[in-house]
Structure formats: structure tokens, C-alpha cells
């Protein structure tokens, strides 16, 4: 698992393109996907913090924080720009930052509210992707849109993916009702 800094040193132009999309509206803004206890996905908007030290996120007490504490797998996707369909994506594992000096420094630089029950996580990078779509021909009659330019980086130190694909059930399971307790995001 590579840190953001290791990824950025290996692929600086790709890392910069991803950073620009995540920070296009000022502070970081994206969608964080986590894994619920039942294995399903959960998606929430977050404000990632990218520094020379790494990729971080302050997560308040919420289902997404409990997801990260239980199963650190995550995916982070940029918010779409207004002028294009470009997109950035990183995925890996999130780890709580326990060094109080680093937490205090990042909290001060990111202006994290001290009275809020948040926890700082560092996100490692197993995969990073940047997709750019040309916009100059979009909507022009008679001009076919070109294929998007996609750049992907895979952590060379990451363990290999499983060789066999996961089996997909051929039938839909029967529906079961259950009581659901609503909690705040």
C-alpha cells in the first residue's frame, strides 16, 4: 500500500491531475465509498486533505467512520466539474492517524473544528485513475465524440488480485423484511 506521497513521487502528473479535480472548488471535495458491515457499499461526500505528507480525511462520528474503523477499504471519487465530465478516483485502505503532533498540525492547517468528534484517517493508494474527456467537439452536429483519455496507476507493491473471478448468483435472493434503525451520516 503506497502513501499518497509515494504515489505522487512515482506519477507526479497523474497525482497532480487527481489533486486538481479533488480541490477544484477550493478545499477538497469528493465522494467516499466505504464497506458496510453487511458488505454493501456506502457513499458520502467528504473533504479530503492532500498535503506533501499524504492524503487524509477528517471523519466525524458516523456510519462511514465505523466502516473505516472496521474495514479500512475505501474508494474516493471526485465531484464532477461543471465544464466537463472529467473524473478522478483513488482506492486503497484508510488508517487512523495516531500521532498527536501530526493530527494537531493537519487539524490546524485544514481548519478542522476542534469541538467536533472527528478522527483523522490517512488514505493509502492501491489504485489511482484520471479520466479526461475532450469537450471542444461535444454537442457539435456531425462530430463524433472521441474516446476519453484514461490514465491508471496500480501500486507495484500491492498484492496481486485474485486469479479467479467472484461467482455471481444466477438467481435473485428472496426478499426479507427487517427493521432498520436510522442514524445520522
Image (cartoon, helix red, strand yellow):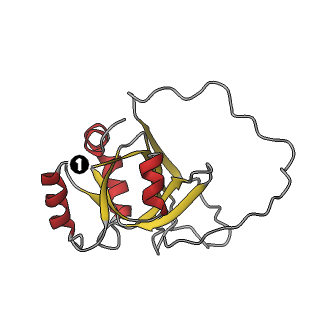
Q: Position of residue 139 (x, y in %)?
A: 61, 73
User: In what element is the residue under mark 1?
Assistant: loop
In the image, 164 versus 62, the foreground residue is 62
Direction from residue 118 to residue 74 in the image, left or right: right
**Which residue matches tag 1?**
98
In this rendering, the answer to whether 127 lies above or below 145 is above
Number of numbered labels in the structure image: 1
In the image, 80 versus 85, the foreground residue is 80
In the image, 172 versus 31, the foreground residue is 172
In this rendering, the answer to whether 106 lies above or below 181 is above
In the image, 14 versus 116, the foreground residue is 116
Q: Which picture quadrant has residue 21?
A: bottom left
What residue is shown at x 31% (from left), y 65% (from top)?
Answer: 118
Q: Position of residue 2 (x, y in %)?
A: 33, 37
What residue is shown at x 62% (from left), y 53% (from top)?
Answer: 40
Q: Position of residue 179 (x, y in %)?
A: 70, 67
Q: Position of residue 54 (x, y in %)?
A: 26, 49
10 Å neighbourhood of mark 1: few (<14), some, or many (≥20)? few
Direction from residue 142 to residue 82 in the image, left or right: left
What residue is shown at x 15% (from left), y 66% (from top)?
Answer: 108
Decide if residue 164 is in sight here.
Answer: yes
Direction from residue 142 to residue 125 in the image, left or right: left
Q: Quadrant of the N terminus?
A: top left
Decide if residue 130 is in sight here.
Answer: no
In this rendering, the answer to whether 98 lies above or below 145 is above
Amino acid at each position: 500500500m503506497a502513501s499518497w506521497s509515494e504515489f505522487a513521487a512515482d506519477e507526479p502528473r497523474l497525482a497532480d491531475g487527481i489533486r486538481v479535480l479533488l480541490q477544484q472548488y477550493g478545499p477538497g471535495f469528493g465522494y467516499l465509498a466505504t464497506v458496510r458491515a453487511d458488505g454493501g457499499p456506502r457513499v458520502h461526500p467528504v473533504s479530503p486533505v492532500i498535503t506533501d505528507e499524504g492524503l487524509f480525511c477528517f471523519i466525524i462520528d458516523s456510519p462511514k467512520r465505523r466502516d473505516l474503523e472496521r474495514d479500512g477499504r475505501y474508494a474516493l471519487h471526485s465531484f464532477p466539474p461543471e465544464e466537463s465530465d472529467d473524473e478522478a478516483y483513488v482506492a486503497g485502505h484508510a488508517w487512523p492517524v495516531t500521532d498527536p503532533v501530526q493530527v494537531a498540525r493537519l487539524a490546524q492547517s485544514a481548519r478542522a473544528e476542534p469541538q467536533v468528534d472527528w478522527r483523522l484517517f490517512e488514505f493509502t493508494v492501491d489504485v489511482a485513475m484520471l479520466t479526461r474527456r475532450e469537450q471542444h467537439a461535444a454537442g457539435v452536429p456531425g462530430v463524433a465524440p472521441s474516446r476519453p483519455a484514461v490514465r491508471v496507476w496500480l501500486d507495484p507493491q500491492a498484492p496481486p488480485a485474485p486469479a479467479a473471478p467472484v461467482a455471481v448468483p444466477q438467481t435473485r435472493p428472496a426478499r426479507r423484511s427487517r427493521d432498520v434503525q436510522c442514524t445520522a451520516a
